[in-house]
Image (tube, grey):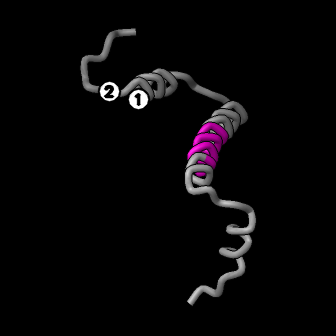
Amino acid sequence: MNQLTLPLSNVQVELLKLYSTNLQDSELEDLKLTLAKFYAKRSIKSANKIWDERGLTNEDMNQWLNEDLK
């Protein structure tokens, strides 16, 4: 593959490599699911970090869930 000289991130380069692949529909669905799981895992990790930094508890969450939205 030719080296790209544009200022692309490592993710952009890898995705461009994928674009040259002709996936079957089932493979494409697998790829989408893999990407969704990747980003979900990152989001959960980030939320857990904030949760721990703020010392939040399950009781805090239950209180928020039961608050009236006005």
Q: Is residue 38 above or below residue 7?
A: below
The chief SS type of the magenta part is helix
For residue 64, side relative to residue 8 (left or right):
right
Q: Which residues are magenta?
A: 37-48
Q: Find the residue positioned furthest to the front.
A: 55
Please provide percent x and percent y for residue 38: 62, 37
Q: Secondary structure at mark 2?
A: loop
Q: Quadrant of the C terminus?
A: bottom right
For residue 61, side relative to residue 46 (left or right):
right
Q: Is residue 5 above or below residue 41?
A: above
The residue where tag 1 is placed is 12
Q: Quadrant of residue 41?
A: top right
Q: Amino acid at mark 1?
A: Gln
As for residue 23 lying within the magenta part, the answer is no
Dot 1: few (<14), some (14–19), or many (≥20) neighbours within 10 Å?
A: few
As for residue 42 lying within the magenta part, the answer is yes
Q: Secondary structure at mark 1?
A: helix
Disc number at residue 8?
2
- At a point 70% along the width and 75% down the height, the residue shown is 63
Q: Nearer the viewer, residue 69 or 22?
A: 69
Disc number at residue 56?
none
Q: CA distance from mark 2 to mark 1?
A: 6 Å
Dot 2: few (<14), some (14–19), or many (≥20) neighbours within 10 Å?
A: few
